[in-house]
Amino acid sequence: MPRRAWRLRVEDILAPIERIHRYIAGMTYDDFCADERTADAVIRHIEIIGEAARHVPSNVQARHLHVPWRHMRDMRNALIHDYADVSLSIAWDTAQHDLPPLVPLITEMLRVEP
């Protein structure tokens, strides 16, 4: 199977962020916790973000140290491997506070990279 280009992997970070934003728009934390499908979808898309970050080559990551590559990978690993202990509050906080600032960082990265 051919490897996907790193630019596609970076786009695979943006698309889930946009979906998560749509999924939780207008929700409160209590709404989020009560909506199992939305919580599952948000968690799954956070996993996708981390998986995509894992496949961005280290030389590209090194040129963009302002992007929290390791944090994205670590979050994915925690969600995948510690699935029984996934905290909805951490997923909510990630969706609300950690993901939105990534959009301009990733967008700028795609703009400046050849």
Image (cartoon, rainbow, N blue to C red):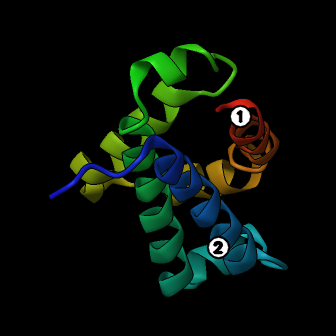
Q: Where does label 2 land, which residue? A: 19
Query: Residue 41: horizontal and vertical position, in percent?
Result: 49, 75
Q: Which of the two discs, 2 and 1, sits closer to the camera? A: 1
Asked whether, in this view, residue 6 is left or right of residue 65, the answer is: left
Q: CA distance from mark 2 to mark 1?
A: 20 Å
Residue in the picture at 73% in, 68% down: 21
Residue sitting farthest toward the front: 114
Query: Residue 14: horizontal and vertical position, in percent?
Result: 64, 56
Residue sitting farthest toward the left: 1
Q: Where does label 1 land, which residue? A: 109
Query: Residue 105: horizontal and vertical position, in percent?
Result: 76, 36
Query: Residue 81: horizontal and vertical position, in percent?
Result: 22, 47
Which type of secondary structure does the marked residue at label 2 adopt?
helix
Check the picture and name the quadrant holding the C terminus.
top right
Residue in the picture at 78% in, 77% down: 27
Is residue 61 positioned above or below 80 on the image?
A: above
Q: Is residue 43 or residue 100 the one in the foreground? A: 100
Q: Quadrant of residue 107?
A: top right
Disc 1 residue type (three-letter): Met
Crowding at mark 2 (Cα within 10 Å: few <14, some 14-19, many 20+): some
